[in-house]
Image (cartoon, rainbow, N blue to C red):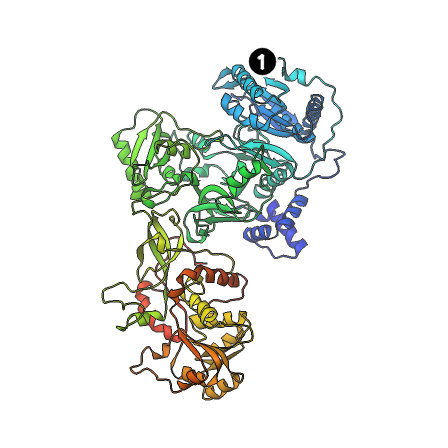
């Protein structure tokens, strides 16, 4: 099912696009165009967003610019829907004026922390808005949180005042929270006596001199509202992580950034206006509460979670649990994902981009989203799952973590996994149409027998069973276990889990996913653990069942191979001139390939199964795979590859592969090329020769290339920057060669041998260096060409030296570093010809070596991938 806005040209997001085009003279036509501009020109994007959303700044407003001051601004209702409260915009301002006056009378000011333990209510909204007016820092927890949870959070931020509800209505019953609140307050004061006042918003007070009612607190004479002027980065919220692996992290957010981010999401992404009514189904303990809670009353935009949608749909589907197919009952269903960490969405749907049901269409504006494997390699173009990483700064990043050591904790939480880049901890995949699917948390990834997948894949199958109320899947690998196995725990709606249902579940998983997705054990439990903000605590359960103390861990998961072993799917195979020599039954640096053996060859591959901590599933590697579709190799034989600006995967079989290594070490170590040298390259249009010529130019040499056609010669000069290129097939070649080498040759880099090599000896300087890389002209001759000018080597003291690139293997990293820099800067250009047809095309490709091309055979195409980068 596909959704598309009926009139995208009338949306505010499209109006913003047009505004950008007009001001910056751009031609942004689609959401993807606008997104690229927003991440490439982040400062300009922020300025335009600020202006477009009409944020008031610097000078306090003299009046409230509201089209309808008596229109409802906020509505709230207690459980049961019988006690509605409404405030108009005019009333809201008057109430805030009173709350601000009361806070100031209580000695609360700029930078003080205000904490709440309250329900969703108008009073909670007023505390939040009043705190923002005076520059105080707001934090909240839900009243369903236990004493320890309250203390763990608020002891870190040391609030000066706490607002609370001492009574709540739950499931039709009044719950008295006074004993819990009193115990929490006592513990807080024992550890840090900063709380000066506790204000009870709803319910009764208790016997404590600092505890007062809201009526007492608000018994002041209000003064005209004046806003405290603060900077864009002044903190407004302290939000908390789940706290499942230690003390909750205190995430401090800037007011300006949070405001701009929320305006972007509401005004641009969701196309809201002053007539919209927004309702977020959540508690005050989650980041989403800070969006300004509205209980449903003429709601036009509703934010909720998949679990609640499931509950809602039971009314529409006769008690059955919903599937994606049932969600068409809602007019628009925007799927998105983000985090408390950045008080923002990261990937989201928008009104310009059509999207498929169950998918998330695009990254939000200003968010440079990539998908990486464990080696920090980009893999989103290959349809495989990986870590969600944000690779450029974004304006809603937290300021810091509150408290001692907060900056270092902040760095370790988000920038340590991939140094300098935001690791969000979500497991994600991009589809061929550019949309995204969140598969679960990275720390909840399952990895039985080396196959990684997210728990969401299992959960999508379980949703089809009406008998199941809830579920959680984790991987178990105890110290004595060789492999990880998947455990599935189910909470039933009623009755017991029987063998018949277990078999049905396993069969459905096997059919919908694969045999490797089938859990080893399925057990019934009484309940499923969740964090305060509604996330299953998969990582904690995983630690418990694996015999570890619950903690955060990033260790690699192991499969059924031997330690360090991997199974690779070969994507590309490099066809190199050396292969012809490997078939000769002649004494050489390597024994010939025997009949029946796998032909040698270097390949670009992706890891499909792994018992390596370094190379996990989805990693792209360079390896001596041979002519195979699948190879089993040890991690010690693998080279990690990285793709970045101007560096493609296939470059690792060209400029960064054996051909590039041969060119680099042949010229620098043997040829010792330097500025002012005259360098001649034979086979200059070939895989090695074209790289060698470009390196020589970068070293400051004058470069002459020799190739076999006028077209190739033109390419060498116009595209690669050779000074001169000569066609050896031309009738006047020797004359042209003599003229071009008037100053005589310093370095002769030879890939051809034969008559050209012989003639070049007559054009050499004294002490010239002849680098013998290959002799393609001699591979198919019965009698090799003999050097007639041999005595020139003696008389001119020419140094002629052959080499094998494998001799430099321990220095490949050095060469790749330099060559990568040149590639990134555009100083070296690469060229490859891709041969289709898999291994069946390899034999024909081997014959094409002598046409002077760098050939790569596409052995297999990764499922879901588009063209390789």
In this picture, residue 227 sits left or right of residue 717: right
Which quarter of the figure is the N terminus placed in? top left
Q: Is residue 295 visible?
A: yes
Image mark count? 1
In the depicted view, which residue is nearer to us: 464 or 665? 665
In this picture, residue 308 sits left or right of residue 192: left
Question: Does 565 appear above or below 402?
Answer: below
In the depicted view, which residue is nearer to us: 73 or 665? 665
Specify the quadrant of the image occupied by residue 189.
top right
In the depicted view, which residue is nearer to us: 364 or 778? 778
Residue at coordinates 34% horizontally, 83% vertically from top-left? 785
In this picture, residue 837 sits left or right of residue 441: left
Question: Does 837 appear above or below 220?
Answer: below
Measured as percent of width and height from the top left, residue 320 is found at: 37, 31
What residue is shown with label 1? 204
Question: Does 768 appear above or below 219?
Answer: below
Q: Is residue 361 visible?
A: no
């Amino acid at each position: 099912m596909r959704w598309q806005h009926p009139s995208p040209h009338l949306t505010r997001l499209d109006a913003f696009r047009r505004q950008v085009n007009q001001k910056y003279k751009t031609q942004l036509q689609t959401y993807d165009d606008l997104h690229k501009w927003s991440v490439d020109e982040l400062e300009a994007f922020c300025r335009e967003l600020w202006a477009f959303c009409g944020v008031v700044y610097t000078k306090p407003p003299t009046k409230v610019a509201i089209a309808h001051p008596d229109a409802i601004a906020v509505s709230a209702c207690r459980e049961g829907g019988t006690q509605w409260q409404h405030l108009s915009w005019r009333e809201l301002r008057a109430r805030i004026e009173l709350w601000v006056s009361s806070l100031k009378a209580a000695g609360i000011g700029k930078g003080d922390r205000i904490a709440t333990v309250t329900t969703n209510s108008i009073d909670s909204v007023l505390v939040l808005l009043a705190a923002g007016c005076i520059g105080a820092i707001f934090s909240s927890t839900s009243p369903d949180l236990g004493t320890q949870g309250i203390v763990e959070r608020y002891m870190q931020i040391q609030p000066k005042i706490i607002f609370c509800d001492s009574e709540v209505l739950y499931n039709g019953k009044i719950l008295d929270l006074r004993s819990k609140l009193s115990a929490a307050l006592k513990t807080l004061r024992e550890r840090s006596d900063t709380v000066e006042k506790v204000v009870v918003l709803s319910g009764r007070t208790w016997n404590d001199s600092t505890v007062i009612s809201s009526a007492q607190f608000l018994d002041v004479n209000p003064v005209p509202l004046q806003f405290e002027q603060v900077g864009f980065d002044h903190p407004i919220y302290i939000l908390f992580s789940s706290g499942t692996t230690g003390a909750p992290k205190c995430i401090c957010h800037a007011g300006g950034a949070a405001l701009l981010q929320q305006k972007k999401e509401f005004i641009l992404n969701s196309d809201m206006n002053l007539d919209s009514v927004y309702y977020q189904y959540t508690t005050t303990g989650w980041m989403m509460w800070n969006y300004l809670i509205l209980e449903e009353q003429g709601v036009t935009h509703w934010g909720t979670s998949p679990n609640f949608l499931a509950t809602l749909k039971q009314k529409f589907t006769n008690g059955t649990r919903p599937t994606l197919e049932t969600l068409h009952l809602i007019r628009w269903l925007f799927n998105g994902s983000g985090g408390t960490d950045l008080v923002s969405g990261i990937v989201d749907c928008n009104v310009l981009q059509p999207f498929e049901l169950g998918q998330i269409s695009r990254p939000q504006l200003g968010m440079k989203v990539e998908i990486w494997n464990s080696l920090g390699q980009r893999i989103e173009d290959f349809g495989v799952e990986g870590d969600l990483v944000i690779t450029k700064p974004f304006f809603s990043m937290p300021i810091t973590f509150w408290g001692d050591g907060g900056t270092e904790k902040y760095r370790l939480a988000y920038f340590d996994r991939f140094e300098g880049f935001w690791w969000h901890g979500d497991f994600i995949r991009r589809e061929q149409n550019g949309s995204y699917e969140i598969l679960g948390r990275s720390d909840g990834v399952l990895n039985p027998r080396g196959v990684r997948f997210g728990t969401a894949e299992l959960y999508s199958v379980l949703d089809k069973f009406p008998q199941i109320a809830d579920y959680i899947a984790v991987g178990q690998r105890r110290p004595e276990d060789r492999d990880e196995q998947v455990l599935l725990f189910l909470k039933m709606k009623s009755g017991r889990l029987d063998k018949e249902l277990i078999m049905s579940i396993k069969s459905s998983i096997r059919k919908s996913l694969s045999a490797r997705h089938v859990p080893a054990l399925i057990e019934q439990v009484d309940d499923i653990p969740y964090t305060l903000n509604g996330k299953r605590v998969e990582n904690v359960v995983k630690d418990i069942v694996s015999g570890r103390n619950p903690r955060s861990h990033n260790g690699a998961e192991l499969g059924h191979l031997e330690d360090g072993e991997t199974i690779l799917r070969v994507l590309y195979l490099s066809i190199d001139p050396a292969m012809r020599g490997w078939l000769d039954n002649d004494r050489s640096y390597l024994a010939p390939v025997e009949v029946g053996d796998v032909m040698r060859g270097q390949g670009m591959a992706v890891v499909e199964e792994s018992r390596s901590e370094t190379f996990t599933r989805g990693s792209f590697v360079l390896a001596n795979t041979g002519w195979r579709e699948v190879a089993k190799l040890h991690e010690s034989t693998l080279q990690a590859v990285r793709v970045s600006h101007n560096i493609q995967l296939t470059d690792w079989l060209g400029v960064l592969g054996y051909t590039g290594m041969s060119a680099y070490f042949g010229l620098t170590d043997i040829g010792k090329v330097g500025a002012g040298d005259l360098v001649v390259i034979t086979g200059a249009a070939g895989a090695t020769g074209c790289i060698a010529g470009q390196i020589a130019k970068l070293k400051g040499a004058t470069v002459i290339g020799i190739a076999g056609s006028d077209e190739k010669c033109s390419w060498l000069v116009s595209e690669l920057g050779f000074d001169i290129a000569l066609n050896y097939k031309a009738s006047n070649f020797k004359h042209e060669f003599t003229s071009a080498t008037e100053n005589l040759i310093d370095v002769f880099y030879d890939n051809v041998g034969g008559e050209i090599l012989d003639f070049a000896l007559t054009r050499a300087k004294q002490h010239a260096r002849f680098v013998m890389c290959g002799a393609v002209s001699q591979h198919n001759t019965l009698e090799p060409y003999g050097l007639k000018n041999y005595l020139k080597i003696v008389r001119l003291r020419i140094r002629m030296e052959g080499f094998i690139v494998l001799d430099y293997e321990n220095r490949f990293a050095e060469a790749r570093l330099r060559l990568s820099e040149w590639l990134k800067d555009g100083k070296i250009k690469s060229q490859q010809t891709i041969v289709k047809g898999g291994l069946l095309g390899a034999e024909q490709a081997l014959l094409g070596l002598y046409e002077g091309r760098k050939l790569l055979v596409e052995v297999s195409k990764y499922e879901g991938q588009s063209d390789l980068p």
